[in-house]
Amino acid sequence: MKKYVVTLTADERVELTGLLAAGRTAAQKVAHARILLKADAADGGPGWTDDRIAEAVEVSTDTVGRVRQRFVESGVAAALTRKAQAKPSRERVLDGAAEARLITLACSPPPDERTRWTLRMLADKLVELEVVPAVSAETVRRVMKKTLVKPHLKEQWCLPDGPSGEFVARMEDVIEVYHRPADPKRPLVCIDESSKQLVSEVREPLPTAPGAPARYDYEYKREGTANLFMISEPLAGWRQVTVTDRRTAKDFAEVLRWLVEERHPGADKLVLVTDNLNTHDPGCLYEAFEPDRARRIAAKLEWHYTPKHGSWLNVAECELAALSGQCLDRRIGSAARLSQVVTAWVKERNERKVGVNWRFTTADARVKLRRLYPAPQKC
């Protein structure tokens, strides 16, 4: 004889039948309702056995037994829901004070000439300092994730050491240029360049396969270097990358000539933003062309220089960073292949007209970078 016998009242049968007909009930509740209806041993009920119910509802006989037990002990509502599993209590390994010590430790210089702390080193150091008797690297990882401390990451910054009138003057000049409205007669053009080490494979890499990452031989062959001139027109969502063997003054002059004579022949002026490289000067035009032609090109250029330690103000450098991260972080063995890669990247990016929404204003700079502004002299 069964210990837990289901006997439903008329109201309970109506409730369970209505639940099955509702159409939007959780599958688990539907299954438990069907179990109760088929197990009902009251007058007129089917009173099926556990094995038969389990086969019909497609559950285990243990599930049928648990539903019976919860109905008898706690009623219909308890039988329709799955019993919550009690979570085992676990003593906290690192309390607030220990977590504070861990964060302080992670932000301190690593020992033994290491470049950074590892999770295991941090765990061992906490034990050595008697902060806790024992702690795992996984516990340390969870605390670091929760507190957003990331000693394995480093970021570069590019700002002068102290107040600099030259820096803020050039910074404000470039910022104001970026906030000018778009003018077809005065297009905004940003230029920067970067070198790329050409490296070819000694052995053919193995492609990615299920369960195995792509694999490359550690040997490689140096094939020289190439230069990339990045030309960016942020307001138009357009850019062009030119691959050259070098980045001499004559190479840069040719880029300027192409912009003035071919890209924007009808423009009154090209508003040009560049950094302070020694070749970025109108003098490069006189090294490459006859004086009349050099003067004609120079007259079309309105130069704006980013400050020293302020290359982040050049949108072309931001474009180069995107290109490097998306396409150039791999071995490329020839200038021809490099040109093929950057051409595909430029084409896709230009088709989407990826522009720049420059939001940093002069007012923002005077607040966020106020330490760089010299104190005015009192008269």
Image (cartoon, grey):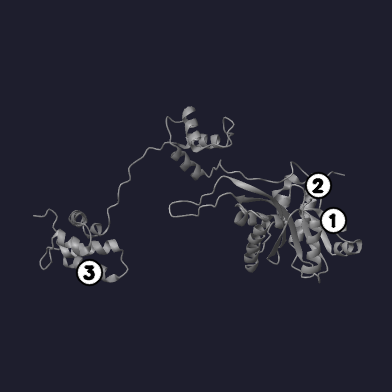
How far from the left and from the top, in percent, is residue 6? 15, 60
Quick check: 211 above or below 178? above
Q: CA distance from mark 3 to mark 2?
A: 81 Å
Question: For the view shown, which residue lies furthest in the right direction?
Answer: 292
Task: Give the image quarter of residue 319.
Answer: bottom right
Q: Is residue 178 left or right of residue 47?
A: right
**How many marks can you see?**
3
- Dot 2 falls on a residue whose secondary structure is helix
Q: Is residue 136 left or right of residue 363?
A: left
Q: Nearer the viewer, residue 165 or 155?
A: 155
Looking at the image, tell me whether mark 3 or mark 2 is earlier in sequence order: 3
**Foreground: disc 3 or disc 2:** 2
**Neighbour tally class for label 1: few under 14, some 14-19, many 20 plus, Cα within 10 Å:** many
* Residue denoted by label 1: 284
The amino acid marked with disc number 2 is: Gly
The amino acid marked with disc number 1 is: Cys
Tell me, yes or no, if residue 55 can be seen here: yes
Q: Residue at x 26, y 71 (%)?
A: 21
* Residue denoted by label 2: 165
